[in-house]
Image (cartoon, helix red, strand yellow):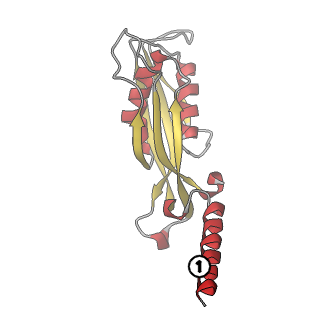
Amino acid sequence: MMNGRISVCARALIASTALLALSPAGAQDHQAANWSTHELDFQYMGFSSRYSCSGLETSVRQILLQLGARDDKSLVTPGACSAVNDRPARIAGVHIKATTLQPAADANLANVDAYWKQVTIGGGLSDADCELMDQVKTEILRLFATRNVKSSSTPCVPHQATLIAPKLVLEVLIPAELAK
């Protein structure tokens, strides 16, 4: 009789482990969500590194997509720039219109099945991009549902290289179809 109980328990444990393995991020990371559109005029101002308007547009677009923003044509458009002929400038700007997932207040009203996914931004960037990572952390991340945000760089000091290439590690809410 005891062997039968152990066998039933073992089979149940194996079955539940298999179900968790099939789940994109584990059952505990499931979240009911809705799409929400946010707009932001993002002005980058750097002392150690400079971007052209098109360079900033490309970098910000890539970061937004990494964070799970919907890939809409109007995601990032050029903004105010202090340089002519698309040269790197101390001040460059873009307009962001990002559609991102936000946790649903009521699961019955949710229209998207979502999961929390760990994302790393940066790390491969040069140490001069510390200022961009700082501004992403304070301005752009608020457009997204995030948790467990960690920065792996030292504080940015103008005109000085950092010891560690800037990197943000965080969890962001993404649609279930992207979590697979």
Say which quarter of the image contains residue 8: bottom right
| Residue assigned mark 1 | 9
Under circle 1, the secondary element is helix
In the foreground, 9 or 76: 9
Q: Residue at x 63, y 86 (%)?
A: 4
Q: Quadrant of the C terminus?
A: bottom right
In the rendered structure, the answer to whether residue 83 lies left or right of residue 11 reads: left
Task: Give the camera-side residue of 141 and 82.
Answer: 141
What residue lies at 57% left-to-right and 20% top-to-bottom? 54
Q: Position of residue 94 (x, y in %)?
A: 49, 28
Residue 43 image point, x, y percent:
41, 25
Label 1 is placed on what type of residue? Answer: Cys
Report the residue at 50% width, 40% height from top. 97
- Counting from the top left corner in percent of width and height, residue 109 is at 48, 70
Q: Is residue 136 left or right of residue 58?
A: left
Q: Is residue 126 visible?
A: yes
Quadrant that contains the N terminus:
bottom right
Q: Total marks drawn?
A: 1
